[in-house]
Image: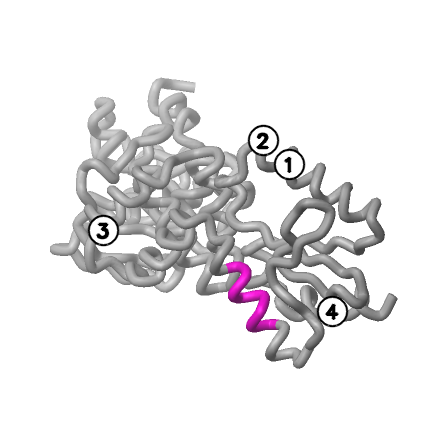
Amino acid sequence: MDELDRFAGRHDGVISRTQALDLGLSSTALERRVSVGRWTRMATGIYMPAGQPISQKAMVRIAVLRCGRGALACGPTAAWWLGLLERPPTHTWVTIPRERRYRDRSVTVRRRDVPAADVAVVRELRVTGVALTVLETAMILEEARPGDGTQFLDRALQTSTSLARLMSAHARNPGRIGNPRSAAMLVHAASGGESEAERIFLRLLRAARITGWACAVRSCGYVIDVAFVDRRVAIEIDGWAYHRTSERMAHDAVRQNALVNDGWTVLRFTYHRLIREPDAVIAEVRRALRR
């Protein structure tokens, strides 16, 4: 194995023509490697050593290289590359400079100029930075399935970024696809989502024609978000998890235990579940009321 193969190995088995020439390989020698079967041409100007398994990471590198100068992985593809998603998306997302054009049915290509502050190089692949990646991935996931995007954003706020960084990235990238939806998500994230979650839950109750409930009911020294007093069913609504401190979680546990010991059936619903599984939420409420 020579330096070129070692370079490819460090890049998930992928090497471009430009990279090979920069490492000292001549055009003639490159074509010879292909003709004798030492390298396999994956796309125009992109190669892999023969026998090299094609991993998901290799496919991402190939997609970005195929899109040419200035390309970078974005959206869910960047989120997976950055470790924000556990599984690679079924589709590849790539951004190219606005001045360029590229069409490929196997890749979702976005044309725009990304500010330098929102570009990162991770394992020698250009990707959108964490904050912009989180914003765009949340929007894409939310469009695919309501609740998934807000939950992803909530988790990222707990582990990978901050609201201030997200808002800065949002401000640096005006006019991008999904900006209004991202703005709405940031508003809910900033407020913690509890008030909005309660409004969503009450809308679900009204739509399902469930009656007999009241808001802000006092019992055991605590205030229950929504209560069916006659049935002794208490509904607790949780906002975004990143807003909940360990002290708040401990307090909620003490409150729930007190209510249960006083004969209440307590159901808890999160902001994200109310959006993602409204029918299941109503079904659980109905089951509790039938007891």
Q: Tell which residue pokes out farthest to the top in this image.
A: 2
Decide which of 69, 212 is in the foreground and name it: 212
In the picture, the disc for residue 96 is: 3
Crowdedness of circle 1 by 10 Å Cα count: few (<14), some, many (20+)?
A: few
Tell me the amino acid under the disc marked 3: Ile
Q: Amino acid at mark 2?
A: Glu
**In this view, 118 is above or below 186:** above
Left or right, residue 23 beside residue 284: left
273 displayed left or right of 139 = right
Residues at badges 3 and 4 in contact (C-beta under 8 Å)?
A: no
Q: Amino acid at mark 1?
A: His
Q: CA distance from mark 2 to mark 3?
A: 46 Å
Determine which residue is flagged by label 4. Answer: 283
Identify the mark at residue 251; answer none if there is no mark: 1
Q: Determine the secondary structure under disc 3.
A: strand
CA gap, disc 3 to disc 4?
46 Å
Res 290 seen here: yes
For the residues carrying marks 1 and 3, which lies nearer the camera in this image?
A: 1
Say which residue appears at 30% left-offset and 42% top-offset.
128
Q: Which region of the structure is painted magenta? A: 197-204
Q: Which residue is mark 2?
A: 247
Question: Is residue 92 positioned above or below 177 on the image?
Answer: above
Q: How many marks?
A: 4
In what element is the residue under mark 1?
helix
User: Residue 144 shows which numbered tag?
Assistant: none
